[in-house]
Image (tube, helix red, strand yellow):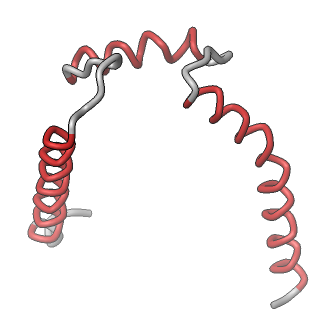
């Protein structure tokens, strides 16, 4: 590896280490349900997506609902991958 490769690795590790603490504390606030500085911007967007998808953010899923959602998501993913592979000759 030449000097530019090592420099790229060092810069990448430096950026990762510099972002670890602020990004981790922001994620802890978001996952804890606290308001952040992005809440006024993304809060209405999140509520709109929840309303569009029929999600109730206050309620939790039981194991049956979770299993059905997981199966539906995986079947949808399989169908998308299958469609991409079948249409690959026409995709650019």
Name the residue located 48 percent from the left edge and 13 percent from the top edge: 43
Q: Nearer the viewer, residue 88 or 82?
A: 82
Where residue 34 appears, as percent x and y from the top left, is 61, 18
Drawn side of residue 5 relative to residue 87, left or right: right
Q: Residue furthest bottom?
A: 1
65, above or below 43, in the image: below
From the top left corner, tell me how far across and down residue 67 is, in percent.
17, 48
Measuring 18% from the left and 56% from the top, which residue is drawn there? 74
What is the x, y in percent for residue 11?
85, 63
**Where is the C terminus found, in terms of image quarters?**
bottom left
Answer above or below: position of 2 versus 77: below
Q: Is residue 74 left or right of residue 43?
A: left
Residue 36: image location, x then y, percent: 65, 18
In this rendered view, identify the residue nearer to me: 37 or 87.
Answer: 37
Where the N terminus falls, by quadrant?
bottom right
Q: How many marks?
A: 0
Residue 8 or residue 56, whichever sits in front: 56
Q: Quadrant of residue 33?
A: top right
Residue depicted at 61% across the width and 14% down the height: 35
């Amino acid at each position: 590896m030449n000097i530019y490769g090592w420099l790229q690795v060092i810069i990448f590790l430096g950026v990762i280490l510099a972002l670890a603490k602020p990004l981790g504390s922001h994620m802890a606030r978001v996952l804890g349900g606290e308001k952040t500085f992005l809440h006024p911007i993304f809060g209405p967007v999140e509520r709109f997506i929840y309303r569009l998808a029929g999600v109730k953010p206050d309620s939790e899923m039981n194991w049956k609902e979770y299993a059905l959602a997981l199966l539906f998501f995986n079947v949808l993913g399989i169908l998308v991958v299958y469609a991409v592979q079948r249409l690959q000759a026409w995709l650019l």
